[in-house]
Image: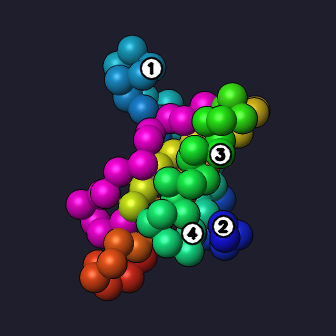
Amino acid sequence: MLGCLIAGLNCWDDFEANGGAARLASGFALLAGSPAEVDEAVARVQAAGHTVVHPPFDAPWGQRYATVADPDGYRVDLFSPLPGAGGTG
């Protein structure tokens, strides 16, 4: 079950999606209970007709990671440690 808000973040928006111009964007990060929970949450967001910015992937830093956008366009990062990755960061 998602529910651990890690922090409000200021992060750089996707460089390529903005025609080569990076912009500062606000967002949040939520720690999921498992990698499968990241996938399930993204599927629920997509089924509800909302935006999936980055589909789930196994990041090189040892997390299952995805980014969605809330109805106002704020980015929400969903993540969970991969088995054997040894932590959240």
Q: Horizontal and vertical percent for residue 50?
A: 67, 32
Question: Is residue 21 at least partly visible in the picture?
Answer: no
| Numbered disc in front, either 4 or 3 | 3
Q: Which residue is mark 1?
A: 18
Look at the numbered disc 2 and give the secondary structure of its residue: loop
Q: Disc 4 residue type?
A: Leu
Give how far apart the Cα atoms at labels 3 and 2 are: 12 Å
Q: Residues within 10 Å of mark 2 (few under 14, many from 20)?
A: some
Give residue 21's quadrant in the image. Answer: top left
Q: Which residue is mark 3?
A: 44
Q: Which residue is mark 2?
A: 2
Q: Which residues are magenta?
A: 51-63
| Numbered disc in front, either 3 or 1 | 3
Q: Horizontal and vertical percent for residue 70?
A: 70, 39
The residue located at (24%, 60%) in the rendering is 60
- Sequence order check: which comes first, mark 3 or mark 1? 1
Q: Which residue is mark 4?
A: 31
Give how far apart the Cα atoms at labels 3 and 1 are: 26 Å
